[in-house]
Image (spheres, helix red, strand yellow):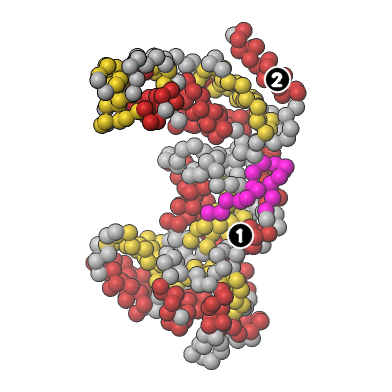
């Protein structure tokens, strides 16, 4: 099962096998093995270049204000009862952005007062996709050989393409990346 | 002939064992107290091991042979980033420590990659102060056999290289151990543990060769004896917070006191036979935190042996 998930191509076959094991271990460690799929790696230490393509299967909904707190109007202003404390910090951040710190008062752990008479627009307070992308990039940087510090990456909700080298990136490597994307789309 | 041993037991009455070792003419190299447990690194005369084992059994402790006692080993990784830490660098260092060695992990400033990999002057000096060095490399054969040897080729001490693939010949290395490479997990399986055991065995072999080399022109005084004299004549060493205030090398020691303040006093240590320590050993500043490095001169230089 694991061997289909990660395919490593390299002139150094033994090195490719070891890198495949390492990739599986790292993905497992960072708990993202389920949101990343079809990983294709091309690595050539003699060039030197490291190209990684992976399909992302992200299906996490965004968290909105209404998911985090219930609203009710009171004499003192708009009262927010926090129902999901996990995102309370992100909610306060968002409210501060909209109303300013001076207009927000946290009465206790689960209660917020906002100095406004109108309803709060149901905006996004937290995007799990962004957090996941950050984790994915972190894990790929762990997989990449350490000296490869010149990096070009392209990440969307569908795929990630990551090209790294020790030398300035060559056009042929970027081309190889593009063909990888097209190949995988065709598949 | 002194035998290196490790005692593990409770704190209660461990001083009885220390007294016994000293009465037998042995030495206590390190005492580590961890809450209620104590680990002692000791050397005792070969003929008296039974006596020490009996005493250890009486105190409900255990005695193990720790062949790497008395050596300081540098475990060198290309950097201290998560590509090498905590596995495998720390695992190897910890395993060697359990065999009695004093290990130091060294992360190089510019050790990564192929083109820019190099050793700075201070890094070279620092690694050369150790008895042997273990270099941790990665998964690609061409890197290990063609490029990375530039990091250790001009070191004066034996270098053991670890990496992932099987390599036929690794230039300038004392030995190459495969099956380690880059790892994201610990050493748990039998085969992985035996790889660690290999690192320890080959380290022991490298140290033995170095000992043989030293035996051809013997040191003019046993380093253990010098350690004892320093402990007695410079009591400040006992106030050092370091786990090993005096770290033994095969041909000398690292004394963890500031060189500027203490070097003169160390040179003026007088031995009961007459000579001063400065006649028997070279005292120089260490690359590590300005400590003191003491190298004992061979008999051919001093002309006498104590």
At mark 1, the secondary structure is helix
Asked if residue A48 can be seen in this view, the reply is yes
Magenta region = B105-119
- Count up the numbered dots: 2
Camera-side residue of A40 and B191: A40
Vertical relation: B257 (above or below) B114? below
* Residue under the image location 55 percent in, 34 percent down: A142
Q: Position of residue B108 (x, y in %)?
A: 61, 51
Q: Secondary structure at mark 2?
A: helix
- Evaluate if marks 2 and 1 touch, with contact meaning CB atoms under 8 Å apart: no
Image coordinates for residue B117, horizontal then vertical, percent: 69, 46
Which image quadrant for residue B24?
bottom left
Q: Residue furthest top?
A: A186
The residue wearing badge 1 is B127
Q: Is residue B113 magenta?
A: yes
Residue A99 x %, y %? 41, 24
What number is the disc on residue A176?
Answer: 2
Magenta-span inclusion, residue B298: no
Task: State the residue at coordinates (56%, 17%).
Answer: A156
Check if mark 2 and mark 1 are on a common chain.
no
- Splitting the image into 4 quarters, where does residue A137 fall? top right
Q: Chain of mark 2?
A: A
Secondary structure, magenta segment, majority class? loop
Identify the residue at the far right of this view. Answer: A171
Which subunit holds the residue at mark 1?
A: B
């Amino acid at each position: 099962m694991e061997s289909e998930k990660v395919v490593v191509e390299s002139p150094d076959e033994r090195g490719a096998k070891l890198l495949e094991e390492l990739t599986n271990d790292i993905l497992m460690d960072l708990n993202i093995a389920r949101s990343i799929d079809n990983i294709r790696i091309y690595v050539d230490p003699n060039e030197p270049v490291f190209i990684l393509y992976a399909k992302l299967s992200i299906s996490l909904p965004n968290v909105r204000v209404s998911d985090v707190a219930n609203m009710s109007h009171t004499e003192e202003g708009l009262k927010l009862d926090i129902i999901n404390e996990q995102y309370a910090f992100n909610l306060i951040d968002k409210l501060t952005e909209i109303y300013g710190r001076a207009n927000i008062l946290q009465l206790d752990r689960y209660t917020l007062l906002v100095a406004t008479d109108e309803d709060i627009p149901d905006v996004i307070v937290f995007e799990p996709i962004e957090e996941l992308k950050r984790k994915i990039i972190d894990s790929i940087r762990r997989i990449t050989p350490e000296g490869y510090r010149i990096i070009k990456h392209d990440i969307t909700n569908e795929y990630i393409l990551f090209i790294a080298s020790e030398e300035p990136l060559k056009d042929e490597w970027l081309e190889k990346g593009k063909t990888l994307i097209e190949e995988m789309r065709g598949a | 002939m002194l035998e290196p041993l490790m005692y593990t037991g409770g704190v209660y009455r461990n001083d009885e064992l220390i007294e016994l070792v000293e009465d037998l003419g042995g030495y206590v190299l390190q005492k580590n107290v961890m809450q209620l447990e104590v680990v002692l690194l000791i050397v005792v005369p070969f003929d008296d091991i039974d006596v020490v084992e009996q005493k250890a059994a009486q105190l409900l402790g255990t005695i193990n042979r720790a062949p790497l006692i008395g050596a300081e080993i540098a475990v060198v990784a290309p950097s201290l980033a998560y590509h090498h830490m905590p596995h495998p660098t720390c695992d190897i260092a910890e395993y060697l420590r359990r065999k009695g060695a004093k290990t130091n992990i060294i992360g190089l400033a510019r050790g990564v990659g192929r083109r820019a990999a190099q050793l700075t002057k201070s890094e070279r000096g620092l690694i050369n102060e150790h008895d042997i060095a273990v270099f941790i490399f990665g998964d690609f054969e061409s890197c290990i056999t063609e490029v990375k040897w530039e990091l250790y080729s001009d070191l004066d001490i034996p270098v053991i290289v670890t990496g992932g693939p099987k390599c036929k010949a690794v230039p300038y290395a004392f030995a190459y151990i495969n099956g380690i490479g880059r790892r994201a997990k610990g050493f748990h399986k039998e085969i992985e543990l035996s790889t660690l055991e290999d690192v320890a065995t080959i380290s022991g072999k490298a140290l033995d060769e170095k000992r043989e080399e030293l035996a051809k022109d013997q040191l003019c005084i046993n380093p253990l004896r010098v350690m004892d004299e320093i402990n007695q004549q410079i009591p400040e060493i006992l106030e050092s917070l370091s786990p090993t205030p005096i770290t033994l090398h095969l041909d000398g020691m690292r004394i963890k006191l500031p060189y500027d303040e203490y070097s003169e006093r160390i040179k003026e240590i007088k031995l009961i036979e007459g000579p001063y320590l400065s006649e028997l050993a070279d005292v120089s500043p260490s690359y590590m935190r300005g400590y003191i490095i003491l190298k004992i001169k061979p008999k051919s230089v001093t002309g006498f042996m104590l």
